[in-house]
């Protein structure tokens, strides 16, 4: 696993001569990095994405290579450090998001480090499904007016993001539900630091409460009060984690990946305990591993505390998300 004390941060306020390079020097580094990447089967596009983040270069200046005529270009880290991280990308498969310290997610740029899972594009669907469930769209299934009932729930509206990591889901929920209070929980203090920093930078700090602890443990005072629970929990079987691509297996936190022998340990816990915390008609929404949705649907149906259980596909058409409502 990666070093959780890693996190590289972009901090434009800490500029120094050490972080100023000539355009020609940076152009030479870019050409060399692209050639090295080709030999290591790493996309040249990664080099330009890194330079957009650490050098503030736009796609046009990179494509035309016009930046090489500039006398000075400020970097967020010294060029030597950038090259060191790039070599780790090539030899240790360090994810490019950990090199820049930033990743795009929905309409945000989120700080990331090896303390947190890198938010994936498919996880963005959780936010859209939550909105549709509240509005009575496809997430509500058109059965029993669930969207209307959720909308009529008494204020304040409380949502929980369990296993928040970078804070992506909590921030996404705060963005689409401007009148809601979001409760974000994670076991890792390092992850919570990242999540809190993201919330602060993006203007959501006053609407997201952060808790360090395991799943529902810090939320005892919210029993029976949550409008919705959303989670992207660890769901990969333990024996599969070491076989994942090296960018994941060697650098992303196993705490956020390992779901136990069959990958369902955390999903079982969420299915079992959530009814104590949800209001009647409250939303239960999770991401799962491909091939797990049938087992998760059975978990919910066997529990007897949910109804209108539905499965939704990800961006690739693979069944990945499970949505349910708490019975009255």
Image (spheres, grey):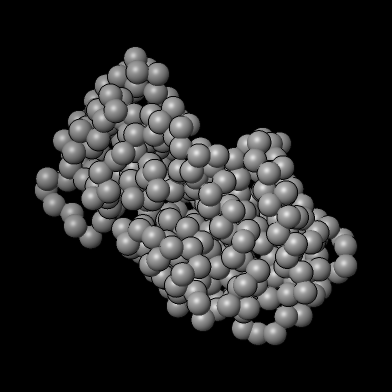
The residue sitting at 62% across, 61% down in the picture is 272
Left of 74 or right of it: where is 222? right
The foreground one among 172 and 77 is 172
The x and y percentages for residue 30 are: 29, 28
The residue sitting at 73% across, 65% down in the picture is 305
The quarter holding residue 252 reads: top left
Left of 277 or right of it: where is 309? right
The x and y percentages for residue 182 are: 53, 72
The foreground one among 71 and 162 is 162
The x and y percentages for residue 279 are: 68, 76
Q: Is residue 156 above or below residue 322?
A: below
The quarter holding residue 35 reads: top left
Q: Is residue 273 above or below residue 95?
A: below
The x and y percentages for residue 145 are: 86, 69
Left of 72 or right of it: where is 145? right
Report the number of numbered marks. Answer: 0
Is the C terminus in the top left, top right, bottom left or bottom right quadrant? bottom right
Q: Is residue 187 above or below residue 238?
A: below
């Amino acid at each position: 696993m990666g070093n959780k004390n890693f996190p590289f941060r972009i901090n434009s306020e800490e500029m120094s001569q050490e972080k100023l390079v000539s355009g020609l020097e940076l152009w030479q580094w870019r050409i060399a990095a692209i050639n090295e990447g080709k030999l290591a089967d790493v996309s040249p596009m990664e080099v330009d994405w890194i330079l957009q983040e650490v050098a503030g270069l736009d796609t046009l200046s990179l494509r035309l290579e016009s930046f090489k005529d500039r006398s000075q270009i400020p970097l967020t880290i010294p060029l030597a450090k950038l090259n060191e991280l790039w070599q780790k990308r090539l030899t240790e498969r360090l994810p490019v998001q950990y090199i820049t310290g930033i990743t795009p997610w929905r309409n945000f740029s989120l700080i990331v480090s090896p303390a947190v899972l890198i938010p994936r594009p498919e996880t963005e669907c959780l936010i859209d499904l939550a909105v549709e469930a509240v509005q009575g769209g496809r997430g509500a299934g058109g059965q029993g007016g669930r969207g209307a009932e959720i909308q009529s729930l008494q204020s304040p509206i409380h949502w929980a993001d369990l296993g928040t990591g970078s804070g992506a889901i909590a921030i996404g929920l705060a963005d689409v539900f401007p009148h809601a209070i979001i409760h974000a929980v994670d076991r890792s203090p390092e992850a919570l630091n990242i999540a809190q920093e993201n919330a602060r930078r993006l203007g959501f700090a006053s609407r997201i409460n952060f808790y360090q602890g395991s799943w529902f443990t810090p939320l005892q005072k919210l029993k029976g009060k949550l409008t919705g629970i959303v989670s992207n929990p660890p769901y990969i079987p333990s024996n599969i984690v070491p076989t994942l691509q090296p960018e994941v297996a060697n650098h992303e936190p196993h705490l956020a990946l390992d779901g136990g022998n069959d990958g369902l340990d955390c999903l079982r816990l969420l299915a079992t305990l959530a009814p104590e915390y949800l209001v009647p008609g409250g939303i239960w929404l999770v991401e799962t591993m491909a091939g797990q949705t049938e087992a998760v649907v059975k978990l919910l149906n066997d529990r007897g505390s949910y109804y209108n259980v539905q499965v939704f596909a990800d961006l690739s058409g693979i069944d990945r998300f499970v949505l349910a409502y708490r019975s009255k």
